[in-house]
Amino acid sequence: MASNDSSKLMFSIGLSDSLSSSSEDIIPMQQKRKKRGFYSRKNRNSRLNQSAMFLNKNYSYGICTMIKFIFIVLIMISLIIGLVVMYSLSKQIDSLHLSISGIQTNNRDLPDAIHSLQSQQKSFEQELINLKVNLNNVIITTSNLTQQSAHLNHKLSQLDESDLKLLPNLKQSSTDYEELKKRLANLQYNQDSIANSFKTFQEEIENLKIKMNQLGSRLDLGEHNSTEQSSKISELQMELTRNLSVINSKIDSNNQSITRMNSALIKIDQQLKQQRSIDQKSIDSPLSFSKNHPADSISFSESSQQDSSANRLISTNETKSFHVKKVLTTDNPDETVM
């Protein structure tokens, strides 16, 4: 359409290609020039305006088509990007659903475990109170034993050579007295070691209480952080089992030392009874001996009474320690199922 309009314009102006090419061969006839009037100029201007308007319309149409094409391309690109983003988001949502379901399955038994740990904590606190009472009783018994052993050492040190000369059988058994002194020294050493072990045992009980308090606070925090708390609870449970095993071993060692003390005191009691019987046989007149040496007879009777009371205290101590050990072994946290 544009080429036809331009050819028409050129033909109207008189500058067409056909006329220009034929004008070289054929001499055109001279025509009279017509005077152009006002209307011919007006028609020419209207045609030029129409051609300019046509060109402007075509240019604007091309620009509109380009803008439409670019807009369609942008829409397609945005749709592709949106689909890719939606696909990646759906994948992430699926993975999150899988992880949440895994966490729910792993922590399904966590409230029951927390409840069992809280009940164990209460039982541990009650056991600690009982252990404190038992430790106080054991400390009292050990102090009584130390006093009795010191009294026995004092009585044995009061035996002079003059007393031994009056009693030939006792003079012959001076080696037995030395052995008895050594045994009493060993008993004192064992009592000191038992006292030290009880002190360490008390310190460990206090540490266990601190750990139990920490366990309670961690259990309170564990309701909010269930995933991270399961590993921490297992570690705390392992620490509790280790501490309880150490406490059980120390209680066993204390029981062994107490049994050794008991056996040594029984041997001392038997030897004192034998020596007492030998003294009674060797002395012809017990009344004269009691008149001459009343303090020695009183000391022997006191020592025998103290030995019997010491044996009774040790037996009660053994029963208490056995009861403590039984309580600790029955309430072992390894039996709980996480």
Image: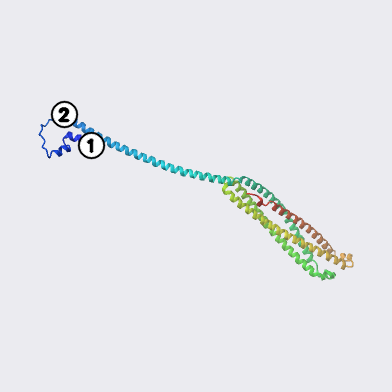
Q: Which mark is residue 38?
A: 2
Q: Nearer the viewer, residue 190 or 6?
A: 6
Q: Which mark is residue 3?
A: 1
Q: Nearer the viewer, residue 28 or 310?
A: 28
Residue 146 seen: no
Q: Secondary structure at mark 2?
A: helix
Residue 168, image quadrant: bottom right
| Residue 281 point in image, percent of width and height | 87, 67
> In the rendered image of this protein, does residue 78 appear above or below residue 212?
above
| Residue 218 point in image, percent of width and height | 60, 48
Residue 307 seen: yes
* Residue under the point 23% across and 37% down: 3
Task: State left or right for residue 134 relative to residue 64.
Answer: right
Residue 51, image quadrant: top left
Which quadrant is home to the N terminus?
top left
- Marks 1/2: CA distance? 28 Å
Q: Amino acid at mark 1?
A: Ser
* Residue under the point 52% across and 45% down: 96
Q: Amino acid at mark 2?
A: Phe
| Residue 152 point in image, percent of width and height | 78, 63
